[in-house]
Image: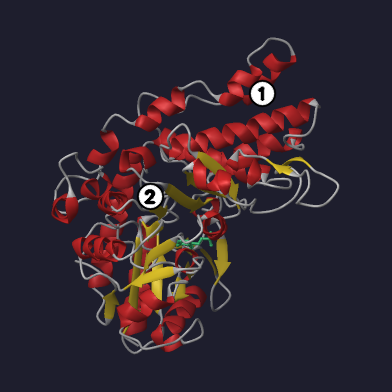
């Protein structure tokens, strides 16, 4: 199955589970997904709300000039941008310094150079947003709102979708959990990251499906048994195996039952283009720090109605229109606009600017180049791991099922902690070990009965890659594993 089949929106004739299964078996290059005419392109070139604010001559004209950014997408593809820290040196045993091989992108990715430049450019005029009359305040407000517009375009959101800036994915799923209409049941697979598994007051948990079509069937069955509002919560790309989930087919099934779908795109957006409109998703959530923008912002993007009707996530200034004299009950009016309503207090402006700069940088580079390079590196990594005796890669589904740049594995005769520590202290390689905040899923993959974070016997090693990963990083990991396993 190709990435294309996963991300393609169901055709009008794709009705029901069988048709959804059909979606899962089409073939085609992952790149195909990225070369079609892109609704996001239209959005990127549409007039910008921030521009409207600033197009007059005079001081506003100066603001406009200060906001100018390079064209979102040049005709040819640009070079893949660099990350900060590519030349970081770390100590290894014996006191030597070696270049750090960062293979832990799925936890937090390094900062892209254009992201750091955007933050540096915004800092001199940094000021309050939505409340100051001063020039710096207006400029910073315009930058913040432009960031919202950029994020909206990046995920191909509908014009009336809300884009709420959050701290991260966990914050975003929790925000939506608090905004669900009363009586909503969440449907969630045991394969989820804890950020998507735990926030729901009322949840139906589904066992890990044996193959993608089984996921669609299990959701169909679960939703059949639910009366009242329902929300399907599913991760687009697993943080444990990197495998891509059939989110278009799952959205289709959810909607047939009148349910909504929230897609945890934390591990997808750094690796693949997402188009919420084309996929017919209701909500997506993701984190800046996994998207090369480690400045503490994330986003919840999606349908505005539930958010507009919910109690404000935080109560305080910015979310409130008018405050009466008797607390919340008399004369206190909250904004209906979901973005204002759920972003009380001073927002993380630099985080939002950084997040938008990352979106711009990836879009400008072009997904074809990004995906092609990642797939080349993943193939090298997986082939290398195959060649190390005693190393077993983890997959929920077929070995060839498409995945992003994440590979978890176990090593015969060594705990994951031993392997990760040796890779760091002897070879200068950073990987993650443990259960990756997905305890039920990792237990399932390892056939383990129980065990939390500290249980080193039921844990795996995870190597994850992205922009900045080199052949040498991968080859060093493979050489190191060969040496460790032959001791
Ligand atoms: C798939 C997935 N969802 C959610 C999260 C939580 O992200 P954050 O820690 O930024 O809230 C992660 C982090 O590893 C993840 O991989």
- Residue 268, how many percent across, how many down? 39, 52
Is residue 207 visible in the rendered image? The answer is yes
Crowding at dot 1, Cα within 10 Å, few <14 / some 14-19 / many 20+, comes out as: few
From this viewpoint, which residue is outermost toward the right?
325
**Which color scheme did the rendering employ for the protein?**
secondary structure
Q: Which mark is residue 99?
A: none
Which tag, 1 or 2, sits closer to the chain's start? 1
Residue linked to disc 1: 66
User: Which residue appears at 81% of the width and 27% of the height?
Assistant: 134
Crowding at dot 2, Cα within 10 Å, few <14 / some 14-19 / many 20+, comes out as: many
- Residue 459, how many percent across, how many down? 41, 81
User: Which residue appears at 29% of the width and 45% of the height?
Assistant: 372
The part of the image, by quadrant, that contains residue 143 is top right
Q: Tell whether 249 sits left or right of 449.
A: left
Label 1, secondary structure: give it: helix
From this viewpoint, which residue is outermost toward the top?
57
Residue linked to disc 2: 271
Residue 443 vertical position relative to residue 52 in the rendered view, above or below: below
Say which quadrant the C terminus sits in.
bottom left
Q: Tell whether 294 sits left or right of 61.
A: left
Is residue 68 visible in the rendered image? The answer is no
Numbered label tally: 2
Label 2, secondary structure: give it: loop
In front of the other: 172 or 184: 184
What is the CA distance from the residue labelled 1 to the residue labelled 2?
Answer: 31 Å
Residue 330 vertical position relative to residue 149 in the rendered view, above or below: below
Say which quadrant the N terminus sits in.
bottom left
Residue 362 vertical position relative to residue 194 in the rendered view, above or below: above
In front of the other: 293 or 319: 319
């Amino acid at each position: 199955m190709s990435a294309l089949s996963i991300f393609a929106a169901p055709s009008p004739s794709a009705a029901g589970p069988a048709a959804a299964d059909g979606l899962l078996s089409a073939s085609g290059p992952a790149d195909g997904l990225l070369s079609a005419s892109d609704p996001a392109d239209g959005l990127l070139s549409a007039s910008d709300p921030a521009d409207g604010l600033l197009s007059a001559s005079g001081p506003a004209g100066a603001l406009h000039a200060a906001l100018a950014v390079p064209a979102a997408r040049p005709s040819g593809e640009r070079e893949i941008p660099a990350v900060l820290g590519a030349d970081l040196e770390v100590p290894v045993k014996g006191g030597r310094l070696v270049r750090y091989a960062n293979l832990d992108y799925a936890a937090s990715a390094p900062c892209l150079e254009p992201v750091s430049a955007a933050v540096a450019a915004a800092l001199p005029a940094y000021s309050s947003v939505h409340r100051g009359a001063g020039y710096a305040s207006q400029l910073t407000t315009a930058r913040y709102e432009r960031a919202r517009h950029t994020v909206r375009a990046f995920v191909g959101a509908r014009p009336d979708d809300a884009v709420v800036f959050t701290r991260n994915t966990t914050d975003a799923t929790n925000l939506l959990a608090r905004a669900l209409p009363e009586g909503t049941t969440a449907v969630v697979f045991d394969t989820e990251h804890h950020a998507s598994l735990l926030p729901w007051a009322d949840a139906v948990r589904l066992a890990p499906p044996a193959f993608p079509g089984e996921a669609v069937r299990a959701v169909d069955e679960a939703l059949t048994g639910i009366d009242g509002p329902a929300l399907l919560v599913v991760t687009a790309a697993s943080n444990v195996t990197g495998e891509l989930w059939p989110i278009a087919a799952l959205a289709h099934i959810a909607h047939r039952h009148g349910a909504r779908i929230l897609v945890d795109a934390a591990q997808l957006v750094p690796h693949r283009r997402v188009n919420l409109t084309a996929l017919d998703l209701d909500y997506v959530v993701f984190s800046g720090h996994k998207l090369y923008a480690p400045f503490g912002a994330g986003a919840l993007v999606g349908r505005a109605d539930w958010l507009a009707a919910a109690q404000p996530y935080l109560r305080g200034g910015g979310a409130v229109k008018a405050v009466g004299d008797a607390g919340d009950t008399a004369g206190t009016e909250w904004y209906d606009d979901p973005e204002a309503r759920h972003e009380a207090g001073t927002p993380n402006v630099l985080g939002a600017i950084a997040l938008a700069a990352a979106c711009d940088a990836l879009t400008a580079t072009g997904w074809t180049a990004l995906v092609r390079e990642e797939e080349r590196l993943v193939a090298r990594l997986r082939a290398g791991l195959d060649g190390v005796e005693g190393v077993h890669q983890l997959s929920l589904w077929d070995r060839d099922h498409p995945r992003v740049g994440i590979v978890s594995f176990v090593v015969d005769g060594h705990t994951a902690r031993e392997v990760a520590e040796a890779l760091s202290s002897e070879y200068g390689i950073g990987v993650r070990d443990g259960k990756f905040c997905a305890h039920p899923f990792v237990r399932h993959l390892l056939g383990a009965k129980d065990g939390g974070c500290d249980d080193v016997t039921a844990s795996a090693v995870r190597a994850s890659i992205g922009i900045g990963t080199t052949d040498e990083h991968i080859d060093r990991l493979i050489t190191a594993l060969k040496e460790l396993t032959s001791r």
